[in-house]
Structures are given as C-alpha cells and as structure tokens.
Image (cartoon, rainbow, N blue to C red):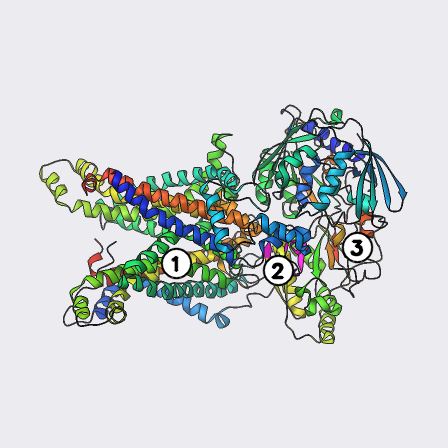
Amino acid sequence: MSSTAAALPVARGQSPARRALRRFLRHRLAVFGLAVVVLFVLVAALAPFVAPADPVQTSWTAIRRAPSAAHWFGTDENGRDVLSRVIWGARASLLAGVISVLVALLIGVPVGLLAGLTGGWTDTVISRIADAMLSVPFLILAIALAAFLGPALENAMLAIAITASPIFVRLSRGMALDARATDWVEAARALGNPPWRLGLLHVLPNIVPPLLVQATLAIAEAIIAEASLSFLGLGQQPPAPSWGSMLNSAQRFLTQAPWLAVFPGLAIFLVVLAFNLVGDGLRDALDPRSERR
Amino acid sequence: MAIWLLRRLGQILPTLLILSVLIFGLQQLMPGDPALILAGEERGDPEVLAQIRAELFLDRPLWQQYLRWISHVVQGDFGFSWRIRMPVSELILQKLPVTFQLASMSFVIAVLIGVPAGVISAMRRDRPVDWAANAVALFGISMPNFWLGIMMILLFSVQLGWLPPSGYVPLTEDPVQSLATTIMPAFVLGSGIAGVLMRHTRAAMLTALSQDYVRTARAKGLPERVVVTKHALRNALIPVVTLGTIGFGRLLAGAVLTEQIFTIPGFGKLIVDAVFNRDYPVVQGVVLATALIFVSLSLVADMLYMAINPRLRQA
Amino acid sequence: MIRKTVFAALLAACAIGASAQAQHLRLALREDPDILDPTLSRTYVGRIVYAAICDKLFDINEKLEIVPQLATAHRWEDPKTLLITLRDGVRFHDGEVMDAEAVRYSLNRHLTLPGSFRRSEMGDVQAVEVVDPRTVRIRLKGPSGAFLAALTDRAGMILSPKAAEAAGRNFGTHPVCAGPFRFVERVAQERIVVERFPDYWDAGRVHLNRVTYLPIPDNTVRLANLQSGAVEFAERMEPDDMQAIQGNRNLRVVAVDELGYQGITININNGPRADTPFGRDARVRAAFELAIDRAAINQVVYEGKYTPTRQPIPPASPYHARDFQPEPRDVARARALLREAGVTTPLTVEMTVPNNPDLRQVGEVIQAMVQEAGFDLRLRATESPPPSRRRPGGNSRPSWSAGPAAPTRTAISTASPAPAARRMTAAIPIPRWTACSTPRGRKPISRSAATSMSRRCALPSARTTRGSISGTGRTSWGMWRGSAATGRCRTG
C-alpha cells in the first residue's frame, strides 16, 4: 500500500542508488539473504563441477542408502546421489524463479504502463482483466494453465509467469498514475511530449525500485510455485531433478528413507527465505518512507 | 450503503465476465479435439464425432459455444465430468464442505497465532520477543507448506505415532477422528497465513500506537491494557480483518497441495485428479468456483471494512 | 453360476469376520472407478464394483472356465450363431423383469451408444434377435472363439432398459442392473455405497446388507485404514507394506496370481504417431526390450516380490508357454540392433505412465535402463485407463497399460508386426496383493475370499486366442508373481 513513494525528489550530494546500497548493507539479515542467494546461484551455475555425481546416474545396487561419506545426502529410490540431485535441482528452481518473473515483468510492466499512461478505456479493460486474473488464487490458475498446456518445466514457467504478471500490471499502473500526477511530468507533458515518451523517460526510472522489491519477493513465490507444480507432476519431468518432484517421490518412502524428504525441502526453504530477506531488505533500503517502524 | 454496494457490484460484474471468458479460453489451449477424447473407440467414425460435436456445440462458432456455456454456468450448470459423467456442480458441492472445514480450521489457527503474536511483538518492539516473532513469521512465510506437511507427518505420525498420517473422516461421522485427521493439514495451511497476519497486525498496531488518540488515552491515565485493547487494537484490526478475509481465499488455494499430501478428498484433490484425468470441465469448474468464492470474499471484506470503520460510511 | 457363488463366498467369509457389525463391509479400492456404466467404463477397478451391482450373461470360474450367470445355457447353432437361454425370474433393481428383450437392448447399447468402449469387444455381432422371452439368438459376422469370453465381462452385463432409456448417457450416475446389490450413492473420490437387493435371483447366498467402496489411492493411507479397522478389506497392497501387514495379528495377507497384466503398448500402425523408427522397425523395439532388465525392475520397485516373465498368460493357465522365458538384458546387442536399424541415437520415445507412485518409478527405471542403449525415453504421467484409447485418433504414444487384457490388446510382439496388429503389448502382469482385516478375536477372512476378489476380475485365457499372437510372439516380456494362488475359489 505504501510502496508508491519512489518518485521522491533526489537528495543532494549522494546518489540515491548509493544511499540505498548503504542502507541495504546496514541490514544484516538482508545481507545474509543475499549471500545465500549468491551461494545458490553459484552452485546452480557450477553444478557440473560442484556435484559429486551425475544426477541421473542410477545404481540398482545402492537404493535408498542413508547418508554416508560416499553419499552425503544418501541415495534415492533409484540409487541416484541425492546431493547431486539437490545441486542440479537448484538450477531448475532458480531458472524457473528468475525466468518466470522476468517474463511476468516483460508482460506486466508495459501493459501496466500503457494502462496508467493512456487511461480511459484501455485502462479500464486492462485493469479489469488484471482483477479477473487476480481473483483466481495463484496456484489454482497455475495448475489449470499447466494442465491445459501440458506438463513440462517450460510450461510450468509460462504458467507461473502468466499468473504473476497481473501483480506487475497493477504495480506499474499505479506508479504511472502517481507519476502522471507529479509536477514534473505535468510540465513535461505541457512541453508537448507524447505519453509513451513520458512513460519511457520519466516514469520507468522511478518505478524501478518498487519493481525490484516486488520482483525479488515474486521470485521467492515463483520458486515455491515451481516446486509445487513439480511436486504435483506438472513441472520438471523425470529423470531431470527438481526439488518439488524429489519431494513427491520421497513421500512414498517416509518410513523407510526419511532423509529423502529432508534435503530438497530444506533447499527450497533456504532459497525462499533468502529471497524474502533480500526483498525485505530492499524494501527498507529503497523506500525511505517504509522505514521499519 | 446500498448505493455503495450497487457500485461495488457494478465493478464485480465486468470482472466476472472477463474471468468467464478467460476460463472458457483455457479450453482452447487444450491440445487435441475434445470430441475425439469423448468418442472412445469410435473416434474413427465421422458420424459419431459429428454427433458428439453437435451434442456439445463444438461445431458452432466460438462465440456461440461461449454463450451456451455461460448461460449454463449462470444457472449453476458447470457441465459434466468426462470421467464419471457426474455434474461438475455436484462434484464441487460434494467437495466444498471438506475444504471448507480445513480452511476454517486453518483460519482459526492462523488468527490465534498471528494476531496475538503481532500485538505482542508491536508492544515489545525491538526486544527479543519481537525478533523471535518476526523470525517465526518469516519462517512461516518462506516454508513451502507441502514440505512442512511432510515433515510433520514424519514427526507426528512416523516417529511419534500420535496422529494419523493422512486420510479424512467427515465431521458428521466421527468428530474426534475428523479433528485428528485435519489438525495437521490445518496447522500446515494456517502457519503461512499466520506469518502474514502477524506482520500486518504488528505494522497496524505500531501505527495505531503512535496515533494521537492513543497518546490522549495514555495521558488520561488509562491503564496500558485498556489503551492497547480498547483503543489501539480496535483500530489496528481494521486492515487485519480485510486481509484475513482475503487470506481465507488463499487458504482455499493452498489447500490444493495440503490435500494432496494428506490425501484429503477436497477441492484440491478434485482439481489435481481432474488434471491428470484430462477431465477438463472439472478443471474449469473448480477454477471458476474458486474465483467466485474469492470475489465474494473480497466483497465481504469490503463490507466488513465499512462496518468496522464508521468513518467510511459517510463517504 | 459358479462365478456368483464365488462372490457369495467372499461375502459369506467376510460376514463371518464382521458379523456383529451390521454386516456392513467396507472395502478400500486402490483407484477411484470411472463412470459406472458398463458400456462406457474403462477402468480395471470399476469391475470390482460391477461385481456387486451388475450381473453378466456368463462368468468365469476358478478353473478359468466359462459358466452361466444370467444365462442358464448356450448352444452354438452354427459357428456364427449363438443361442442363449436366460435364467427365469430375474429382476432388475427397478423391479423390471430381465428378459430377452432386455438382453437385446443391452447388447445393442454396448454396440451403438456413442463413446462405447464395448464396441471392439462386440465387433463380431451382426444382430441380436429375441426368439422368445427366455431365449436370445446372436448372429456373428464370422466365427469367433472369443465371443463368449467377451460376455463374461462388461460387454455381457445386462442393464434395465427402462432405466437406461430414461437416463441415456447419464446411466452411470445411477446404474440399474440385476446384481446382488443395488446402487445407493456415490461421492466421487470418496465412496460408492451399494445395498443388498432383496429380489436378487440368488438372494440366499448374499449375506451382507451393505458394501461401501472407498477409493484410497495412497498406499500408506489404505494400510492405515486397514490397521485402524476403518475398512475390513483392501486390495492391491504394496510389496513395501507386506512386512507391516504380516506383523499385525489382525490382518491377513493373501497373495494371488492375477490374470490381469501390465505392459507397454506400442503404437505400430495407427496414425502419424506410429510413423517413427520405434513404430516402424521391429529391430528398434527389440533393442528397447533388450535394454530392459526385468529382474532389476522387480528388485528395485517391488522388492523382488514378483517373478519376471514375458507373456500375458499367467503360469497357472494351460496356455502359458513355459519355454518362452525373458532374454537377459544385453545392452551391447541392443546398441548393435539400433545401429543395424540405422537410427541416430539418442532416439526419442515418448511413453505415458499411470500416475501412481510405483508405476512412475517403473517408468523412471526403464527410462534409465534404455538410456544406456541409446533411447531418450520421455515419460508422461496420466491416469490409469489405457491412454492409447483415449488419445485422439492416430496420436497414440507407447503407453503403460494395466488391467485384464482386453481382446484388442493382446498382440504380444516386438517382432515384425502382423498385418492385423494395431498395437503391440508386452506384458508385466501385476500381482494383486490383497489384505483383509479381521476384527479382534474373530475368525480371519477366508483366503478364498481374497482370491475371488481378484478372480472376479479375471479374464479367460481363451480370449488371448483372438488378437494376433500367432507367428509374432517373439519378444514380449513381463513378470509374474511366482507362487500360485494361496486360496481356491469355492462353490458355496
């Protein structure tokens, strides 16, 4: 509700980005979150080098082995190394989180700006569509979309992107409306600048901070959504590892091999927590009005 | 109030209309021809296909199909399940009480945890209690609830053997057993919402505590307990109530995974099974029904907001 | 007749165990049945419910012989003409009389209702004639040794014409047949309730007042319900759970040989999707088979409780070919075959698997195995009915199919396709683990009860003579539970 404050006048002497960075760094938990995110990104990017084994290499003689020196996280029901699967699973999860949010941004922001800047009928139609999409719970809409598109990681990502986009439509529309009301945009318009230039030149830079906050939090949600869809069998398809689908098969062996359920879940939890911490920190840093009260 | 309600309804109608178009449009994303799926072994027989298409209006232009569909939906006819040929509306009505029980229980849990935690944490601001409450809330928000569910089964059912791992007993059949089967899923579902509620309550309380009327009350020498409960909390709860109502809608969605883990035959299992059965009318029906519930809940939230906050009524 | 007594034996047996408890049997099913319309239904599990509500013209006994049920006798007037005499005094659940006209109506409905899944089983029928109220004459297009067998399954179920006419396609929401129990209610995914039908033609042998079927797909939950006494009977238990069941004094496990099988159905001649190296070239399919290690699947997924085999005919059957055993896994030869066939590896093959945890794992195990030979196997999870039938025309992917063999799915070869063979089936029959709980201190449910549970869904081996086994039965594969059935079905 209060994240519409980005278009404040710039303080003298110090660039706002710098100030924000300083404030962010003061936020110890956020820095911790960022460190975890960076760690996971590195692990995911370097998966082929970091993972001790091939994540899809089965071994029929080593099924459901408990964690040991050879397999730190144990082996799964097909004798695959769980640690390696968790590491490669980071790829699926982070990619799904980041790409789907990027796509959502690419859909949501231009549409939202269009609505906010042009107003009138365009605005009404776009806002109503966004309302309609927001009135279906996120996961249900994503499941329905994934179901109709067919099960695949790409489709799950698309479904998540589509369901996440109305949030960005709303946000950027609100920002555009706010910005349109400020003096300097009025002035720019009086000087004869067409609306699209206003959008590009004046509004966009100002909505970056709140978008950044929202996007970070959305990534956290998208990662959970991907895990959920994969858990239901609508995301990553076997044998490729995904934290969600690992949890799904782990549930079958809860009595015999509980460790199978622990590690992938812990990974999801850590990443999501980290993104949430970063998001909170960014909000505090970028939005001077929403100082932690 | 009446005028406000009418205006609000006027806003909802186009939303619902667009929603219906979107949900109808889902069907167009579907790979393959529904008639072929329904035709069974006679799919090679053009006559049978034509008959099925005619029966389902599939041979008409899209807009006519839509009009037929929406006119049925308005009358409460959501079509029939392709798999078991029962009316979708009946299926939904059968499943709704189960999910409703689960959602209500988790809502109660969320409120019981979230609101007091928020109040306490606001009053003990920046003290250890506040930090702990914030940390727990953040954990609650970040915890994927299906994992929490699995971990709870592991602890309470597999290790300790206190609760049944899954399954469901209707409340009417055996209330005790019913509670035993739903308490874990309800807690799992409620914990996420509790975190959100706690954060909002805390923020609202902090705002309220810094308001003039609270300062006045304090200056009058009223005991702190009265100040907090009578003055601050009352006002702080206004946004919490609206949020809570909408949170209830989120619970319905969250139930999808929780029901899957605890094998509770509710709304969530209905849509997931329908997805794998390619029972598209059921998928559509469930999406539409949740949207309807969600929209009516936000209407209720608005009305509650008006009711609690008399200042708005004049506007 | 004997089939009915088999069923009664089950009821009697369970009634002993649960006598005081209002003679209400609660039975946990592994899946939720699909539509309860004998013409339209497809699932294996649906047959378990039909056994209570819909009698058939003929039945199969424990020796896999065809015996009369609603019929009393049959006679082939010539190889193309079958004369059936009907039982007297049979009534449908709505009180209507079951007569020759009802039989004619039902068989015609199976043949002509749009969306019928019985048509291929009944494809030989040219005409059904009413001779007199007790006699029906069926004319076939050509001689068919398997036709009678079709009438022991859903195609032989007789519906009340009055009810069917009134309900049309919605008959399945409230089926009206002539079985020992009548349909009461159904809550999807939750329960199907049937109650004793007092006017049943063999009512003296029905000892239960009510049966509730509870679909509980989750193995852990099914077991938990059995242990807590929430159900008296559960079918198809997981090998993983055997220990838990055997350790419980109140539970009794019965392992039975199944007649149904599971296998991979490959589309080799149906539409554009068959036009792949996998569908066209027998060498590619042979390579696929050589890459699979049945023993390892058995070990990894089923704890070694099954016995691999390569044919859909159970060892107990006289038609089982003893010297037709699976070949050991040979990845080198598989690779060589692929090279010979000239395909570029990895060769992508898409296979649908039922969305059960254990079968999904079977899919993943096979995926890993064939990958070494040069296949890129993509898995697609769907629900249980044979997806090949549901896929739009000409779109069939290879698919894992379960349940008793329907006549159209009995060709069993990866070798050169016989002209008639539209689909190829390699079989892994699934043993049905069945467990039955006995309330404290009472007599355990007889083994024959459990045996009959699955026997009732049995398929006469005669049926496999249809299809196109001849000349092509080269490289099918499968698994059988080795031990023979521990119980015998008994005529009451």
Amino acid type of the residue tagged 1 in the rendering:
Ala
Q: Tell me the chain of label 1.
A: A
Badge 1 vs badge 3, beta-carbon distance below 8 Å: no
Q: Quadrant of the C terminus of chain C?
A: top right
Residue at image location 71% in from the left, 47% down from the top: C431
Query: In the image, is residue C190 above or below residue C142?
Result: above
Percent x, y of residue A235: 51, 59
Is residue A187 shown above or below B163? below
Are marks 3 and 2 in one subunit? Answer: yes
Label of residue C245 in the image: none
* Mark 2 residue type: Glu
Same chain letter for marks 1 and 3: no
Q: Which residues are magenta?
A: C381-402
C389 above or below C148?
Answer: below
The answer to whether one can see residue C363 in this image is yes
Nearer to the camera, C57 or C344: C57
Report in which chain the residue with disc 3 lies. C
Circle 2 residue = C364
Question: How far apart are labels 1 and 3 at the CA level?
Answer: 52 Å
Q: Position of residue B119 (x, y in %)?
A: 25, 43
Structural crowding at the residue carrying mark 3, measured as other residues with C-alpha within 10 Å and reported as few (<14), some (14–19) or many (≥20): many
Q: Quadrant of residue A237?
A: bottom right
